[in-house]
Image: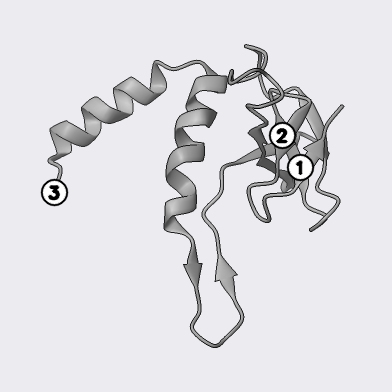
Amino acid sequence: MLTDEDRERLAGQLVALPVHELVDVLRRVLPSYTEAGSGSGLRTTLVLATATQDEDQPDRPDLTLVAWPDRDRYDGGLGPDQGLWEDGHCAQCDVGVTSNAKRAYCPVCGSRCFLT
């Protein structure tokens, strides 16, 4: 078990990463926390998301899931070193997605997403 100091050190390392590298680290971690209900047909996946609030409607944030860049498309790389500027929808499960890359994978169903 980690101590508070260990978790603080890990948090400091994560905060130091640029967004595209943080997304890649979390791509490797979050799917490990997927839970499938035995016999219920339900599956719960831990995902990363952005929440955008309009000052005219602060009680209604727009939630968008962060899609994992298609590393094959970027020759094993993480895609462009930019913020989460690319947006779109997953054609398979119809969730809104964002990414630093134009080609990415839905964090819910794993389908390839084409972002603009």
| Residue 102 coordinates in the image, percent (x, y) | 78, 25
Quadrant for the C terminus, please: top right
Secondary element under disc 1, as helix, strand or loop, is strand
Nearest to the observer: residue 63 or residue 23: 23
Q: Residue furthest bottom?
A: 39
> Compared to 69, does 89 lie above or below?
below
Q: Residue at x 62, y 11 (%)?
A: 81
Kindly check if marks 3 and 1 are in contact, taking CB atoms under 8 A apart as contact: no
Image-based side of 34 in relation to 40, left or right:
left
Q: Nearer the viewer, mark 3 or mark 2?
A: 2
Q: Which of the labelled discs sits on residue 112, or is there none?
A: 1
- The answer for how far apart the CA atoms under marks 3 and 1 are is 36 Å
Image-based side of 110 in relation to 32, left or right:
right
- The answer for how far apart the CA atoms under marks 2 and 1 are is 6 Å
In the picture, residue 65 is in which quadrant? top right
User: What's the amino acid at mark 2?
Assistant: Ala
Image-based side of 80 in relation to 29, left or right:
right
Residue 57 seen in this snapshot: no
How crowded pointer 3 is (Cα within 10 Å; few <14, some 14-19, many 20+) is rated as: few
In the picture, residue 45 is in which quadrant? bottom right
| Residue 90 coordinates in the image, percent (x, y) | 81, 48
| Residue 41 coordinates in the image, percent (x, y) | 61, 81
Q: Residue at x 51, y 38 (%)?
A: 27
Which residue bears the numbered disc 3?
1
| Residue 91 coordinates in the image, percent (x, y) | 86, 51
